[in-house]
């Protein structure tokens, strides 16, 4: 499996500085729902400390954790792609401190600085590819379901 990249350390220093000029420090208490699947994705975060679980709702009563994110990890990518709605839900697994970025401001910056925009999209794509690969590995490690009614 490929090594996970961290968005802020993957950006060259001048591009990181331009992006960080848009950052706002936020915190989430443990057990706080950060966002819900299907709602508007208008921001993203880079986790500074703590842990966040990404989950998928299976039914009205049950959610399944699909990933756990920690320091340096990107939280949220749906802001980058239409229809700009969260594909998963996210909850603070512990006290979380993060940098929050307004998606519209970041997209404007990417239009002004196309080199930064291309680098940012490549970094997000690499992060998504790594998470997809990690999910595939976890699914392959699951035991095969037993067939019912078969002798």
Image (cartoon, helix red, strand yellow):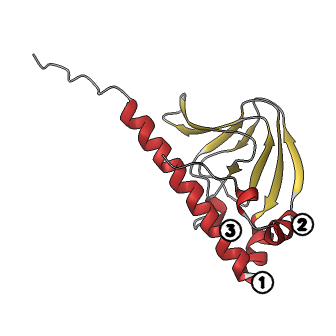
Q: Secondary structure at mark 3?
A: helix
Q: Is disc 3 surrounded by few (<14), some (14 to 19) or many (20+) residues within 10 Å? A: many
Identify which residue is drawn at 52% across, 50% down. 2
Q: In this figure, which residue is indicated by the disc labeled 1?
A: 112
Q: In this figure, which residue is indicated by the disc labeled 3?
A: 120
Question: Which of the image's four quarters has the C terminus?
Answer: top left
Asked whether disc 1 touches disc 3, contact meaning CB atoms under 8 Å apart, the reply is no
Q: On residue 21, which mark appears?
A: 2
Q: Earlier in the sequence, mark 2 or mark 3?
A: 2
88, 66: nearer the viewer:
66
Q: Is residue 149 left or right of residue 50?
A: left
Identify which residue is drawn at 76% across, 81% down. 113
Camera-nearest label, 1 or 3:
3
Which corner quadrant of the image does residue 105 belong to?
bottom right
Q: CA distance from mark 1 to mark 3?
A: 13 Å
Q: Earlier in the sequence, mark 1 or mark 3?
A: 1
Which corner quadrant of the image does residue 52 belong to?
top right
Q: Is residue 14 left or right of residue 137?
A: right
Identify which residue is drawn at 89% across, 56% down. 24
Q: Is disc 2 surrounded by few (<14), some (14 to 19) or many (20+) residues within 10 Å? A: few
Identify which residue is drawn at 58% across, 46% down. 88
Q: CA distance from mark 2 to mark 1?
A: 14 Å
Residue 32 in percent (x, y) is at: 77, 34
Residue 97 in percent (x, y) is at: 84, 41
Q: Secondary structure at mark 2?
A: loop
Q: Is residue 134 left or right of residue 54?
A: left
Task: Give the tally of numbered discs.
Answer: 3
Q: CA distance from mark 2 to mark 3?
A: 15 Å
41, 69: nearer the viewer:
69
Which corner quadrant of the image does residue 107 belong to?
bottom right
């Amino acid at each position: 499996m490929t090594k996970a990249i961290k968005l802020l350390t993957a950006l060259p220093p001048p591009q990181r500085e331009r992006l960080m000029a848009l950052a706002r420090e936020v915190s989430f208490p443990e057990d706080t729902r950060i966002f819900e699947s299907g709602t508007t994705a208008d921001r993203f975060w880079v986790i500074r400390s703590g842990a966040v679980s990404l989950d998928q709702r299976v039914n009205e009563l049950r959610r399944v954790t699909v990933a756990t994110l920690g320091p340096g990890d990107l939280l949220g990518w749906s802001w980058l792609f239409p229809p700009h709605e969260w594909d998963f839900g996210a909850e603070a697994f512990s006290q979380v401190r993060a940098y929050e970025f307004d998606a519209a401001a970041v997209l404007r910056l990417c239009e002004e600085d196309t080199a930064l925009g291309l680098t940012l999209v490549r970094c997000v794509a690499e992060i998504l590819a790594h998470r997809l690969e990690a999910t595939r590995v976890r699914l392959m490690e699951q035991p095969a379901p037993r067939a019912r009614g078969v002798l």
